[in-house]
Amino acid sequence: RKEVEQDPGPFNVPEGATVAFNCTYSNSASQSFFWYRQDCRKEPKLLMSVYSSGNEDGRFTAQLNRASQYISLLIRDSKLSDSATYLCVVSPGDSGGSNYKLTFGKGTLLTVNP
Amino acid sequence: NAGVTQTPKFRVLKTGQSMTLLCAQDMNHEYMYWYRQDPGMGLRLIHYSVGEGTTAKGEVPDGYNVSRLKKQNFLLGLESAAPSQTSVYFCASEDSYTEAFFGQGTRLTVV
């Protein structure tokens, strides 16, 4: 099983649609979880952190299910400007020790169409 | 606050030439990473460092070397460039539990 696995996509949706991305991770000791956004030919940037209780930021909602080792990102009322690649990121936190490393999924490309 | 700075931003090399990419961060982060990104491949980890003086191999380390002599700098070296190393290279830094910050990338072409 890959360390972090995402829906391969691509996703093509109309403006106003709701779209969900899923991500699974293999290390049950992982401590921190994030969603990043990467625009074409740009560096990845943090979109939001993911907490056990779930968190929401405007049209974006992130969920974490530790039992299933599963993370999700929901985008409501999609805008043209949401078109980007979305990356799931997992960190072992202090449990990593000398093997610590941040692990990225391959990313899911979203295109929002007018 | 500059964050993470990569130099150079663009470079064209001939096959067999060598070069060093520099990553500098001013956030006192312990962890630093070098990734390469190719179309359809996502970010692939080349090497990483969990602290000054330490380095470790990532997913695709062959053909690259790294050094972390100072906490704020992480250098990526290509000893003998090959066309397969044409890519966009990203450096990142972070501390455990916190957001990772990326440099703007280096676009390298090997001809």
Image (cartoon, rainbow, N blue to C red):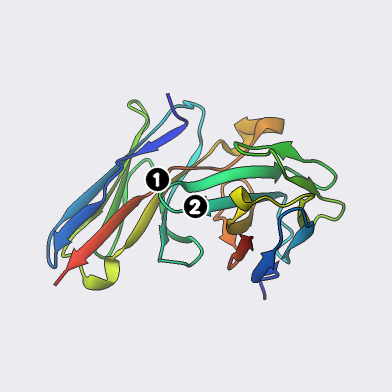
Q: Residue shown at 60%/48% (left/top)?
A: B84
Instruction: Tell me the number on the disc at residue B43.
Output: none
Quadrant for the N terminus of chain B in the image: bottom right
- Name the chain under label 1: A
Where does the image place residue B33, in percent across and percent down from the top left?
A: 65, 49
Q: Residue shown at 56%/47% (left/top)?
A: B97
In the depicted structure, whether residue A67 falls above or below residue A58: above
Q: Nearer the viewer, mark 2 or mark 1?
A: 2
In the depicted structure, whether residue A51 falls above or below residue A95: below
For mark 2, what is the residue?
B38
Q: Which residue is nearer to you in this view: B75 or A32?
A: B75
Where does the image place residue B80, in percent across and percent down from the top left?
A: 77, 50
* Kind of element beneath mark 2: strand
Q: Amino acid at mark 1?
A: Tyr
Where does the image place residue B17, in percent across and percent down from the top left?
A: 78, 57
- Name the chain under label 2: B
Where does the image place residue B57, in percent across and percent down from the top left?
A: 69, 36
Q: Amino acid at mark 2?
A: Asp
For mark 1, what is the residue?
A51
Quarter occupied by residue A112:
bottom left
Dot 2 alpha-carbon crowd within 10 angstroms: few under 14, some 14 to 19, many 20 or more: few
- Compared across the picture, whether A54 is left or right of A91 comes to left
Number of marks in picture: 2
Can residue B5 be seen? no
Dot 1 alpha-carbon crowd within 10 angstroms: few under 14, some 14 to 19, many 20 or more: some
Cα–Cα span, label 2 and label 1: 31 Å
Can residue B104 be seen? yes
Which residue occupies the extreme bottom position in the image?
Answer: B1
- Compared across the picture, whether B63 is left or right of A81 comes to right
Q: Is the Cβ of the residue at disc 2 closer than 8 Å to that at disc 1? A: no
